[in-house]
Amino acid sequence: MLLLWAWAAGVPLTGFSLLTWLWLALLALFPQIIGHSSLNWSLGHLSATYVSLAVLGEPIGSTILAWVVLDEAPAVTAVVGGVLILAGLVIAGRDQQSAGA
């Protein structure tokens, strides 16, 4: 569907260097292999509820990486939202630990 949309919009999909294609492939593979495999592994050790809540931390990690690697400082609202998400994860983690799961 994305290829059709790009074609209809006239977005060029050729002419990129091999290095660009390598980075695109790595961007597709590593999140799938490491990220999703980690989620599947964690389901064997934690409750599905806690794992699904932990996924909310992914945008926080992406924001930190964008800040460090690309020098893109997050907006104040993003920081406030990230703090609220992390606080919720801490609370859920305490509940998870007290439940003994």
Image (spheres, helix red, strand yellow):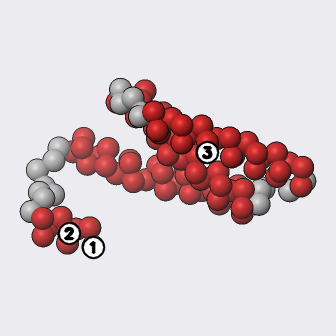
Sequence-first tag of 1 and 3: 1
Q: Nearer the viewer, residue 42 or 21?
A: 42
Q: Is residue 43 left or right of residue 3?
A: right
Residue at 11 percent across and 50 percent down: it is: 15
- Check whether the beta carbons of the residues at disc 1 and disc 2 lie within 8 A of each other: yes
Q: What residue is drawn where x is 24% and y is 43%?
A: 20
Secondary structure of the residue carrying numbered label 1: loop
- Note whether residue 41 is visible: no
Q: Please provide percent x and percent y for residue 6.
A: 18, 64
Query: Which element is circle 2 on?
Result: helix
Which mark, residue 85?
A: 3
Question: Looking at the rendering, in which quadrant would you find the C terminus?
Answer: bottom right
> Could you say where residue 1 lies in the image, as x and y percent from the top left?
27, 73
* Amino acid at circle 2: Trp
Graded by Cα atoms within 10 Å as few (under 14), some (14 to 19) or many (20 or more), the crowding at tag 3 reads some
Q: Which mark is residue 5?
A: 2
Residue 1 numbered mark, or none: 1
**What residue is shown at x 35% (from left), y 26% (from top)?**
71
Q: Nearer the viewer, mark 2 or mark 3?
A: 3
